[in-house]
Amino acid sequence: MVTYLDFEKRIEHLDEAIESAKADGDLQALEKLQKELDKEVQKTYGGLNDYQKLQLARHPDRPYALDYIRLILENSHEIHGDRAFRDDTALVCYIGWIDGHKTMVIGEQKGRGTKNKIKRNFGMPNPEGYRKALRAVRLAEKFDIPVLLLVDTPGAYPGLGAEERGQSEAIARNLFEFTSIKVPLISVVIGEGGSGGALAISVADRLAMMRYSVFSVISPEGCSAILWDDPKKVEVATKALKITPDDLMKHHLVDDVLDEPLIGAHRDKQSAANVLKAYYLKSLKELQAISTEEMLEKRYTKLTSVGAFTE
């Protein structure tokens, strides 16, 4: 069953009419309605505002990390645990093959349905999740395996237990360690990229975003609560934060924007997975064409060029 957002009411109506025409076998009406739907899709998705893009990034049907892993990774095997506390299911690690290339895939996983959302902690990793990611990256480095990182979290889990076990240290450790990992690191924001929880697996040679994804230092809800103490200001905060791929590209904070289907990855998961796979293979080819020393130097230069200051 398709979940429609508030700005998709006209599309929902046309989809229902198309299903009725199919059931009636009315080919003439079906053709007319399909043309109307195509025009409506172009009109609606061609002029989305920042808040509508945020809604799409959080769409309940949007493909999550495990969806992409199942679509692009062959002969995969999951890696569990941080070898210190426990296995954090909000962050998953798999090793397998992508088009003949052995690959380590690490992703933040939200989960669908009440039980699965609770199991995955709503995609908010604890420190053991980030330590598991670091363990997997070090394992990949040991065996010269490139790494694909899939970012999709509202933020790192802010609970008391997470803080007691060193949440900030775990994130900072990843930021530090990833800079010197001697294998290609390719990171893609597939949904939400929230604060330090996203940064912990975003230090990479290539950082890309799907067309309808967001990447921010704080959620628009958190921003509106802090600045205005008014939940009605979420749309204003979304625009002010500059969290969409186009805005971040203008500020040279991400390297590429991946052209997922115009109507959203949730409507065509296979096409979205194909785009992600193609970007990974293209980036991997470019990175493998240079020496490890040059790759690390470019990574260092890329990271240290972020931001600006004035005196």
Image: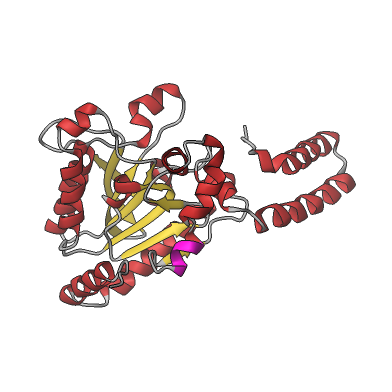
Closer-to-camera residue (101/202) = 202
Closer-to-camera residue (69/132) = 132
Q: Is residue 75 visible?
A: no
Residue drawn at point x = 19 percent, y = 58 percent: 178
Q: Which residues are magenta?
A: 246-250
Residue drawn at point x = 74 percent, y = 54 percent: 38
- Quarter the C terminus occupies: bottom left
Kindly give the residue lying farthest to the top in the view shown. Answer: 115
Q: Is residue 116 visible?
A: yes
Q: Is residue 294 shown above or below 238?
A: below
Q: Is residue 127 shown above or below 218?
A: above
- Whole-percent x, y for residue 22 in the image: 80, 38
Closer-to-camera residue (17/270) = 17
Residue drawn at point x = 38 percent, y = 32 percent: 122
Q: Residue 147's image quarter?
A: bottom left
Judged by its main secondary structure, the magenta piece is helix
Residue 40 appears left or right of 60 = right
Closer-to-camera residue (2/72) = 2
- Whole-percent x, y for residue 156 in the image: 30, 39
Q: Residue 186's image quarter?
A: bottom left
- Whole-percent x, y for residue 195 in the image: 34, 47
State yes or no: residue 272 in magenta: no
Residue 227 appears left or right of 96 = right
- Whole-percent x, y for residue 148 in the image: 31, 55
Residue drawn at point x = 19 percent, y = 37 percent: 128
Total numbered circles: 0
Name the colour scheme.
secondary structure
State yes or no: residue 249 in magenta: yes
- Quarter the N terminus occupies: top right
Kindly give the residue lying farthest to the front in the view shown. Answer: 311
Q: Residue 161's image quarter?
A: top left
